[in-house]
Image: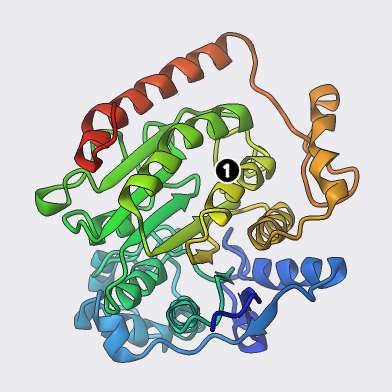
Amino acid sequence: MQSSSPVFIYSSEIASRHYPAGCPFKTERATETRSILRTAGDSFFREEPPRRATETELRSFHTEAYLEMLQRISGGDLRAGDLFFGVGTDDCPVFPDLYPYAVLAAGGSIRAAELLLAGETPCCFNPSGGYHHAFSDRAGGFCYINDVVLACKRLLASGRRIFCLDLDAHHGNGTQAAFYDDPRVLTVSFHESGRTLFPWGGFEDEIGEGAGEGYNVNVPLPAGTDDDAFTRTFRAVVPPLISAYRPDSIVLEIGMDILAVDPLTHLNMTNNAIADTLPLLRDSAIPILAVGGGGYHPEATARGWALAWQVLCGVEPESDLTIGMGGVFLGTTEVSGGLRDMRVYTRGGEKRSIDEQLEKVVGVVREKVFPVHGIAA
């Protein structure tokens, strides 16, 4: 019997581990998200601790040499050749908590997959997950172990068909690479265009290969994309694909680096963009495994995740639904109450240019991907 209680993955152990103080990636965001939810009232979900991913689980995607290197450098033994694994850079620093944290964060997403498979919950959220830049043998973009891939593999092992949806300003290149030729996972990524942001890829013509051709979808968003452009594009792409693909599970990355206040990206969105689209997933009645992701304004990220979790669980306070309207007049993302940001808008020639670019992107998806799934272009 499936429980009606959603599950939030968290423990004091994972909260105690951190990236270096000067690194933009802050693990504290998960703790702040939990604090916001507790203040707002957390009776609608239960909390479960993560567990460490096992060596067998880690090796289901990552190479043995890479995993051995991660363990070694966490002990302080960094060698010149390790740079070829992508570590020892500003984006992937070496620090003592590296391996223990990464293994626990990955285990949290695998634990969430197990809870879904057991029918114990319709929805899980691991805010300490979302490391979609990690490849099988290489780190990248603050990511060392790809928990998204490992969670998908756990679901695949039980015969699930997966809709892997990545809503993060940075393209999920590691996740894309893992399933590029696999039709059992329909991977869809909405992200800032690789023309203006790391990892400089994820273009609309990257649609998969071999048996996976048509099962990888990229929607690059021009710099300056606002809530309106995002939600319109989302509705044009995601619901038809979910309806046609008929997945057993949705794996959802919720990156809050899409926000206009994020210091590392160039989009013009508020947390309303995610909140307004999540009901389309929630109301599908397909089990959802959600993870965190990017977000380099810690306070705004935590507020956005708390809001997204409320929406996924169907418990957002009624008063919050109108909070975002103030931005039309105030031109700010500062909140006046509740969790929703004030909306901001891109206008004039920039807006027209963005809309035209997104129409072309959607056109490519309709031409090259929709027919694979029997959807009329």
Q: Foreground: 77 or 304?
A: 304
Q: Say whether residue 148 is left or right of residue 226.
A: left
In the image, is residue 96 above or below residue 208?
A: below
Badge 1 density bin: few <14, some 14–19, many ≥20, Cα 10 Å: many
Q: Say whether residue 60 is left or right of residue 291.
A: left
Residue in the picture at 49% in, 80% down: 119
Residue at the front extreme, as displayed = 1
Residue 317 position in % (x across, y down)? 83, 55
Q: Say whether residue 212 is left or right of residue 12.
A: left
The amino acid at mark 1 is: Ile
* Total numbered labels: 1
Residue in the picture at 36% in, 26% down: 361
Q: Quadrant of the N terminus?
A: bottom right
Q: Work out whether residue 75 can be spotted.
A: yes
Residue in the picture at 21% in, 43% down: 214
The image quadrant that residue 10 belongs to is: bottom right
SS category of the residue bearing label 1: helix
Residue 136 position in % (x across, y down)? 25, 69
The image quadrant that residue 335 belongs to is: top right
Residue in the picture at 66% in, 70% down: 30
Q: Work out whether residue 193 can be spotted.
A: no
Give the residue pinned by disc 1: 258
In the image, is residue 346 above or below residue 18?
A: above
Residue 90 position in % (x across, y down)? 46, 59
**How has the structure been colored for display?**
rainbow
Q: Quadrant of the C terminus?
A: top left
Residue 166 position in % (x across, y down)? 44, 52
Residue at the left extreme, as displayed = 210
Q: Foreground: 9 or 169?
A: 9
Q: Say whether residue 89 is left or right of residue 293.
A: left
